Amino acid sequence: MAIVSTTEPVQRSKATSAYLIKNPREIKNSFTPTDASKAADILKIGAEKEIAELKSFLKDYDMTSISTNELKKVGRQLYSSGAIDVMAFGMFISGNGEFDAKGNQANTHVKFNAIALFNQKLEEYAKFLEDFPGHATPDNLTWKKAMIAANHAIGALTYFVNSTNNKLSVDEQA
């Protein structure tokens, strides 16, 4: 066996492609709430004024066509308001997962479906932990819980983006 030395530096790249979304048309899933009170509970919103403010903030964002840059802003708003913890915030700021050769986020302006992305990442991670139970460590289970929280948050945001009123209850007339 011969060892050949080289004077050329080994090129190492930190580049990763964007996460491949298998169902880019997904607009609802099991994490999408069906009424305002559930959506408000998820986001820890208690007043109609807070809902109006959230809807005003979200008016420029579509969770089915959002960039990493935009998702970071949405995540920051949720984290700052206490709606999500730092681990769930990590899901938002990681965006579509594309990095350049130096390890910096790349193509952060490219739009993707965050609903489908978050749901698919959670499903694949849950399957991984099921297939390899030895990896179901406390830290990995904490990350899975954060992924669930991020899915709930994105579902609640989608509900409020698509709803027409700011009330937490249904008005009934006899």
Image (cartoon, grey):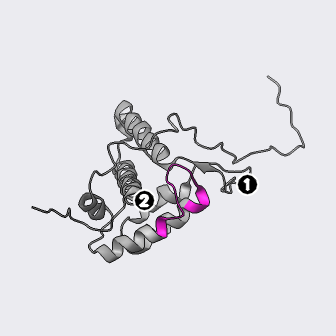
The residue stretch that appears in magenta: 57-70
* In front of the other: 24 or 34: 34
Quadrant position of residue 21? top right
SS state under label 2: helix
Earlier residue among tags 1 and 2: 1
Which of the two residues, 101 or 92, is positioned nearer the viewer here? Answer: 92
Label 2 sits on residue:
161
Query: Residue 109: x percent and y percent?
Result: 67, 56
- Residue farthest top in this picture: 1
Which quarter of the picture shows residue 130?
top left
> Which label number is shown at residue 157?
none
- Give above or below for 20 relative to 45: above
On the rendered structure, is 158 left or right of 167?
right
> In the image, is residue 50 above or below residue 96?
below
User: Badge 2: how crowded within 10 Å, few (<14), some, or many (20+)?
Assistant: some
Q: Position of residue 14 (x, y in %)?
A: 69, 48
| Nearest the eye: 45 or 5 | 45
Q: Quadrant of the N terminus?
A: top right
Is the residue under label 2 in contact with that under label 1 (CB below 8 Å)?
Answer: no
Is residue 97 in view from this perspective?
A: no
Amino acid under label 2? Val
Q: Mark 1 is on which residue type?
A: Lys
Q: Label 1 belongs to which residue?
A: 102
Specify the quadrant that holds the C terminus: bottom left
Residue at x-position 35% and y-position 50%: 148
Tell me: 18 left or right of 56: right
Q: Rounded to the nearest whole Å, what is the CA distance between mark 1 and mark 2?
A: 36 Å
